[in-house]
Amino acid sequence: MRSIIDVLDLTVEEINELIQVALDIIEKPEKYAEVCKGKKLATLFFEPSTRTRLSFEAAMYELGGNVLGFSEAASSSAAKGESVADTAKTISCYADIIAMRHPKEGAPYVAAQNASVPVINAGDGGHNHPTQTLADLLTIYREKGKFADLTVGFCGDLKFGRTVHSLINALSRYKNINIVLISPEELKLPSYVKKDVLKKNGIPYEQTTDLEAVMPKLDILYMTRVQRERFFNEEDYLRLKDSYILTPEKLKNAKEDLSIMHPLPRVNEISVSIDKDPRAVYFKQVLNGKYMRMALILKLLKEAGLL
């Protein structure tokens, strides 16, 4: 039974196919309105989420399916001590496909090993967030029409940001990608990501603490929030939380066709005055996430012989 735990579980060809299906869904929504009639998606969210959970639910409803699940660990049997493996086996009796978010790295992998239906990782700790990466890739494709020959800047929390790690992994498979890493010293991209992904794939990258200095060369700026929930002490969080705040002033030397992305939620790292800038595409990203989740649900249900 195929599950998607990491974006690298999908080949470049499969990602391209998912993008084409998503574009077809955008073009002809009525064609897909009843495809999943009678099918059920279980959303097992052991950690709070707005966008991802509702995006999965909207995706399944727009495919004509149904949704069941929970939105926090306290409202599940995990509060009684049930293991992830047992939860997965149990939910497999009720649903045709599972989307799981969990604060512990590897929990969706354990679920996939024990479920008898496909499992989609909807985010596990600071580790992976493959469907956010698919949303990011569709956004880049719709804005730029390609993945090759781009300079992508990642700014903010590059240490704990699972969306950053996943997208760098995905982009590493395309040609002539340049990566610019912008963060405070304490929140630099982990050395294992640099070693196992960037260096291993021969991808040129630079590290800096100065966003404005590198702004003119960027085709894409991927902003992230400094995540309070990933810090071990409040003092460090408070010291670093306002490290980078994107304002119109900081964009004065940016390219006219820069695309400003953010996985959301935003706290204060992008000024709301930028929302009206045509280069701001982070709310388009949200919508693209729904389309890619629709495409992925269809793919996994078909491969499982359930459609």
Image: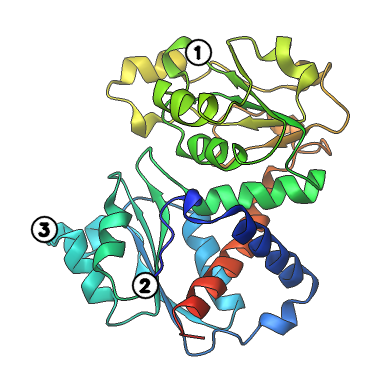
Residue at 35 percent of width and 75 percent of height: 117
Q: Which one is earlier in the sequence, the residue at label 3 or at label 2?
A: 2
Mark drawn on residue 81 = 3
Q: Disc number at residue 184?
A: 1
- Which residue in the structure is indicated by mark 2? 1
Q: CA distance from mark 3 to mark 2?
A: 26 Å
| Residue sitting at x 60%, y 85% | 35
- Can residue 284 be seen here? The reply is no
Instruction: Give the structural element (helix, strand or loop) at label 3.
Output: loop
Q: Foreground: 72 or 118? A: 118
Residue 215 in the image: state x and y as whole percent. 75, 18
Name the spot of residue 20 as percent of width and height, x first.
Answer: 72, 64
Instruction: Give coordinates of residue 256: x percent, y percent.
Output: 88, 29
Work out whether residue 40 can be spotted.
yes
Kind of residue at badge 2:
Met
Image quarter of the N terminus:
bottom left
Q: Is residue 192 above or below residue 285?
A: above
Query: Which residue is painted at 33% across and 15% down in the image?
Result: 235
Quarter assignment of residue 32: bottom right
Badge number at residue 144: none
Q: Check disc 3 and give the amino acid type.
A: Gly
Q: For label 2, count other residues whose C-alpha is less than 10 Å away and answer few (under 14), some (14-19) or many (20+).
A: some
Say which of marks 2 and 1 sits in front: 2
Disc 1 element: loop
Disc 2 element: loop
Quarter of the rendering containing residue 238: top left
Q: Are marks 1 and 3 in contact (CB under 8 Å)?
A: no
